[in-house]
Image (spheres, rainbow, N blue to C red):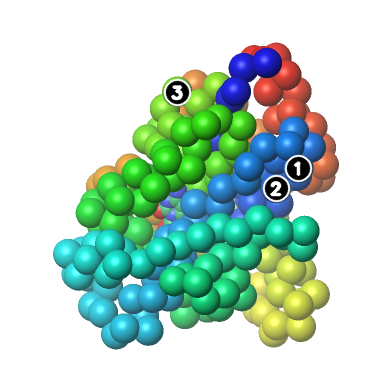
Amino acid sequence: NKKMNIAIDGPAGAGKSTVAKLVAEQLDYLYIDTGAMYRTLTLAALREGIDLQDGGALTHILSQTTIHLQHEQTGVRVLLNNEDVTDAIRLKDVTSNVSLVSSHEGVRIEMVERQRRLAEKGEAVLDGRDIGTYVLPDAEVKVFLTASVEERARRRYEEQKEKGMPADLDQLKEEIAHRDQLDSTRVFAPLKKADDAVEIDSTTLSIPEVAEVIIGLAKERA
Ligand code: C5P
């Protein structure tokens, strides 16, 4: 069997990470959450009080920062210079600033290099915004996963409620739409469907159903 890579891109809250995790588990592939990497840099920068408009300062901080995606029985832990920040990178302050941090070209160039290194042996599932268009343009399987903004906000809302975090549906909808807007209009490697990506609308599909479609694509290409 060919050692392939699977790229899953799409807007915020479409279910990319849940689907990617499931696909990776079923194929025994490595799951690489590229959004977690940008979130981790954002957290580090917020803590250091760096001006998030300053691409040079952010690129410098990144060069001194290790980000590990550590795979464990219980899931993937995210480590910032060996500190477990798995939960901290999901907090609101990070979410609302991550698009700005990840818009800088210097930041992206370094992140993309790290991501390519992680995927270089193949058998990896990467989820993000620019995997199919920029990080791995030769990925054997490319998926662009979407869902209506209402459905994406509703899923986030349920997720947060389950975690006991207070949430406001309209506000979530606004945040998601705003983040998509920033991610798809940035100059360098914006969120965009690759020409050869298969678009899957998950509005009316369950996570296992989406995973099954992707595994089917992988088997076709194997
Ligand atoms: O996937 P997640 O929602 O955790 O990603 C957080 C943010 O990181 C995105 O909104 C986007 O600004 C940035 N990102 C990116 N390129 C990727 C993955 C994430 O710019 N490949």
Q: Which amino acid type corresponds to the residue marked 1 in the rendered image? A: Glu
Instruction: State how far apart marks 3 and 1 are (Cα).
Output: 22 Å
**Image quarter of residue 203:** top right
Q: Give the number of the disc on residue 138.
A: 3
Q: Nearer the viewer, mark 3 or mark 1?
A: 1
Among the two numbered marks 2 and 3 on one chain, the one whose residue lies closer to the N terminus: 2
On screen, 141 above or below 109? above
Residue hosting label 1:
25
Residue sitting nearer the eye, 108 or 144: 108
Residue shown at the point (37%, 35%) measured from the top left? 134
- In the picture, measured across the screen, residue 221 lies left or right of residue 104, that is right
On screen, 52 above or below 111? below
Residue shown at the point (68%, 23%) measured from the top left? 218
Q: Quadrant of the C terminus?
A: top right
Residue hosting label 2:
21
Residue shown at the point (22%, 66%) measured from the top left? 60
Instruction: State how far apart marks 2 and 3 are (Cα).
Output: 21 Å
Q: Does the CB distance between marks 2 and 1 fall below 8 Å?
A: yes
